[in-house]
Amino acid sequence: MLLKDFQKQVDDWTGQFKLQYWRPHEILARLVEEMGELAREINDKFGPKKRKSEEAKKRIGDEIADILFTLACLANSLGIDLEKEFKKMMKKYQKRDNSRYRKKKKF
């Protein structure tokens, strides 16, 4: 799925509601909440802080998907084309960081 298709799917679904998108700062607050949930899952699985027995266990993939959905909502609400921005970002990294890291040996 292309990013534009992803954004359209989110836009189509949210379009059924009277208030399609929250204000940007409200979406940002939601994004921070979702990041906290992802951090909690990562810390439980890989870090020293394990969850309490009464805490519900969530899947890391679910939390990442929640973040992607929230980012699509933010981009859509601001009229940002994520596919265009992602392509620009990849060009920047490919140029700037091309020799920054040690590459795998080619066989």
Image (spheres, helix red, strand yellow):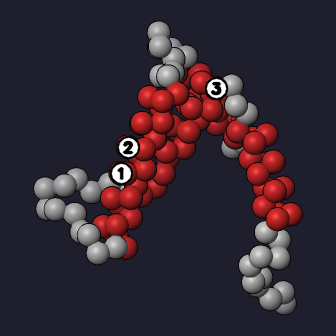
What whole-number distance in Å separates the C-alpha atoms at marks 1 and 3?
A: 25 Å
Q: Quadrant of the N terminus?
A: top right
For residue 72, above or below residue 18: below
- The amino acid beneath tag 3 is Leu
Q: CA distance from mark 2 to mark 3?
A: 20 Å
Q: Disc 2, disc 1: CB below 8 Å?
A: yes
Disc 2 and disc 3 in contact, CB within 8 angstroms: no
Give me the residue at 64% from left, 36% from top. 6
Residue at image mark 3: 78
| First reached walking from the N terminus: tag 1 or tag 3 | 1
**For the residue labelled by badge 3, is the local secondary structure a helix, a strand or a loop?**
helix
Above-or-below relation of 17 to 26: above
Going by the numbered disc 2, the residue's amino acid type is Glu
Which residue is denoted by mark 1 in the rendering? 37
> Which residue does the image show at 78% across and 61% down from the upper left?
93
Q: Which residue is mark 2?
A: 33
Could you tell me which secondary element the residue under label 1 belongs to?
helix
- The residue lying toward the viewer, choosing from 64 and 34, is 34
* Residue 35 locus on image (x, y percent): 43, 50
Identify the image quadrant of residue 102. Answer: bottom right
Q: Earlier in the sequence, mark 2 or mark 3?
A: 2
Q: CA distance from mark 2 to mark 1?
A: 6 Å
Residue found at the far top of this picture:
18
Which residue extends farthest left? 54
User: Where does the C terminus fall, quadrant-wise?
Assistant: bottom right
**Residue sitting at x 84%, y 55%:** 91
Q: Position of residue 95 (x, y in %)?
A: 86, 63
**Disc 1 + disc 3, Cβ < 8 Å:** no
Q: Is residue 47 left or right of residue 71?
A: left
Where residue 45 appears, x then y in whole percent? 34, 70
The amino acid beneath tag 1 is Glu
